[in-house]
């Protein structure tokens, strides 16, 4: 139950941070900080669910698990990219090209884990 709340909170924070970047026509420190909190919550929830509670190996055994790890990796790369984008330059100009892709992968991984 608590993992559902954690992943849900991470989803809300992550999508708020991404959406704010589009609405404000650029990144702000508060949106990157929100992004960092979402990444931390998602990482903690993933470790809690996959390793501690389920007592399985670190390698995913399901499609949802594989998508979750892929989404977490992409989210981490996207966060590092956001940090570089705060400094300006080419990374700032190209940042929003990758945002919809990263968000779509994360949302797909999130939705694939919702029980039917």
Image (cartoon, rainbow, N blue to C red):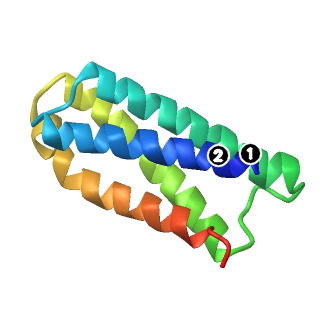
Q: Residue at x 42, y 63 (%)?
A: 105
Q: Residue furthest right?
A: 55
Position of the C terminus by quadrant: bottom right
**Secondary structure category for the residue under label 2:** helix
Q: Residue at x 83, y 58 (%)?
A: 57
Residue carrying label 2? 5
Q: Are marks 2 and 1 in contact (CB under 8 Å)?
A: yes
Q: Nearer the viewer, residue 59 or 18?
A: 18
**Secondary structure category for the residue under label 1:** helix
Q: Is residue 29 above or below residue 32?
A: above
Q: Residue at x 57, y 72 (%)?
A: 112
Q: Nearer the viewer, residue 76 or 8?
A: 8
Q: Quadrant of residue 69?
A: bottom right
Query: In this rendering, would 89 be left or right of 112?
Result: left
> How many discs appear?
2
Q: CA distance from mark 2 to mark 1?
A: 5 Å
- How many C-alpha atoms fall within 10 Å of the one at disc 1: few (<14), some, or many (≥20)? few
Q: Percent x, y for residue 99?
A: 27, 51
Q: Is residue 6 above or below residue 88?
A: below
- The numbered dot on residue 2 is 1
Query: In this rendering, would 48 be left or right of 80?
Result: right
- The numbered dot on residue 74 is none
Q: Percent x, y for residue 81?
A: 30, 38
Q: Residue furthest bottom?
A: 116
Q: Quadrant of residue 16?
A: top left
Q: Nearer the viewer, residue 104 or 88?
A: 104
- How many C-alpha atoms fall within 10 Å of the one at disc 2: few (<14), some, or many (≥20)? few
Q: Percent x, y for residue 9?
A: 54, 42
Q: Percent x, y for residue 11?
A: 48, 48
């Amino acid at each position: 139950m608590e993992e559902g709340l954690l992943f849900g909170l991470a989803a809300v924070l992550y999508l708020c941070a991404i959406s704010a970047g589009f609405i404000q026509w650029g990144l702000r420190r508060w949106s990157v900080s929100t992004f960092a909190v979402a990444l931390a919550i998602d990482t903690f929830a993933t470790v809690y669910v996959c390793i501690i509670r389920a007592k399985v190996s670190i390698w995913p055994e399901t499609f949802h698990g594989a998508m979750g790890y892929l989404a977490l990796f992409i989210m981490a790369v996207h966060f590092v990219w956001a940090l570089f984008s705060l400094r300006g330059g080419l990374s700032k100009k190209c940042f929003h090209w990758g945002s919809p892709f990263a968000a779509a992968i994360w949302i797909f991984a999130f939705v694939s884990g919702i029980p039917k």
